[in-house]
Image: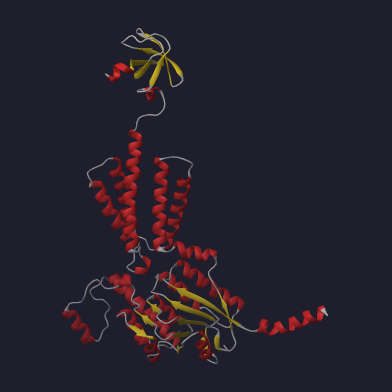
Amino acid sequence: MYWRMLLLALLLSMPALAQERYWQLEIKGAIGPGISDYLVTEINQAQVERPALVLLTMDTPGGLYSATRDIISAILESSVPVVVYVSPGGARAASAGTYILYASHMAAMAPGTHLGAATPVQMMPTGTPSPGEQDKNDQEGEASPSPGGSAMERKSLNDAIAYLRSLAQLRGRNVEWAEQAVRDAATLTAREALEQNVIELLASDISDLLQQLDGRDISLKSGSVTLATAGLIAEQRRPDWRQQFIITISNPNIAYLLMLVGVYGLLLEFYSPGFGVSGVTGAICLLLAMLSLQMLPFNMVGLGLLALGLALMVTEGLSPSFGILGGGGLVAFVLGSVLLFDTPDEAFRVAWPFIAAFTTCSLGLILVVVRLLVKQRRAAPVSGASAMVGEHAMTLTTLDPDGTVLVLGERWQAHSSTPVAAEQTVIVMAVRDLVLDVKPVKETRE
């Protein structure tokens, strides 16, 4: 009876085991090294495990150019269909997201979403052409990119245009609008993108998307395939702990936080050596910050200004200069925080509220801690012979002028310019060559 039930359970589970699945990945937020590693790893793994398709849902303001190119290269080399779906409603595929959408084998968007603004922000023109130059370009029919920019800016802009045009030509999508998205930062709503052949599908949700994908032919590098999406089971593929860790520390705000915590930890350890907790914590945070900066486009000038600002504020606490050093350190700290990451992309810059909060906390913490340390250094000693000055003692013998006293549980030779009888209370005025100068308490009160 037991074996029959087991066999029946196996037979019932076989259709579910045999049913095909698709992988669902997600881009939410800025595209950086962590997201790139996650997507490239999963797309490469899909070549081994062969799901029916890879569905990438996307909502991104943009990201790093190098990370975007790595993702696109993995999509172009994939022998498994990669479908990019901009969702949910209100999501966007801006900047780098537009490139990924164009690279996909099938592009879809949900109602209420948009894409575009694909001009590389670090390559935008810094000036405008003169009227004569613009008229000349119009007459010649040339689309001269950013005439007022530098040669490097024009070169980079043309490279980005050619890159997106090549993706549009490869997938048979709107080439002219692809150029406008880069050159003029043009944008489209989901319905406009469908009408202008920028995307293939407009789907309200994933179920609707799978239904529309069923039976469609897709051209892959290895040849053409027909999608069979009816009854597919979704398999959510999340970043593993290593990829999630990289995603976390490659956030500019987290990198900024790690760097400051590292510096504060080491400063506290140097000024007040203890069990090493602050030093070890600071060293670990500083190393993690260095790893973060290695993955992000940071600016050496910004890093130098940040270090200079901290140094000046520490100097202000050690040797007050009526606010000159502290004020200069504050300005350098703010400028360094703003310039730390070398990109105008807001997704990869330290947030202004974060900078303001840490600037205030840094200034207050450094001034308070350093002043407390200075005050501690100037405080009266609490041990040794000099610590006995001002202490009360009991005369063991008559002081006329020399004798013996008991102070802090110890017998000392004492000298008094005024005769003092035994068993009288005296006060220590000074310590000279292991001899205490004392005076009677009554005399000191007068």
Residue 342 lies in what quarter of the image? bottom left
Whole-percent x and y of residue 134?
20, 81
- Could one spot residue 433 in this view of the protein? no
Q: How is the image coloured?
A: secondary structure
Residue at the (30%, 43%) spot, across then down: 317
The vertical placement of 249 against 224, above or below, is: above
Does residue 126 appear left or right of residue 424 in this picture? left
Whole-percent x and y of residue 1?
83, 80
The vertical placement of 127 against 291, above or below, is: below
Q: Residue furthest right?
A: 1
- Could one spot residue 153 in this view of the protein? yes
Whole-percent x and y of residue 37?
50, 68
* Number of marks present in the image shown: 0
Residue at the (43%, 68%) spot, across then down: 32
Whole-percent x and y of residue 175?
37, 86
Q: Residue furthest left?
A: 132
Q: In what quadrant of the picture does the C terminus appear?
A: top left
Q: Residue furthest top?
A: 400
**Residue sitting nearer the eye, 442 or 2:** 442
The vertical placement of 15 against 349, above or below, is: below
Does residue 391 appear left or right of residue 241 in this picture? left
Residue at the (41%, 59%) spot, across then down: 255
**Residue sitting nearer the eye, 127 or 35:** 35
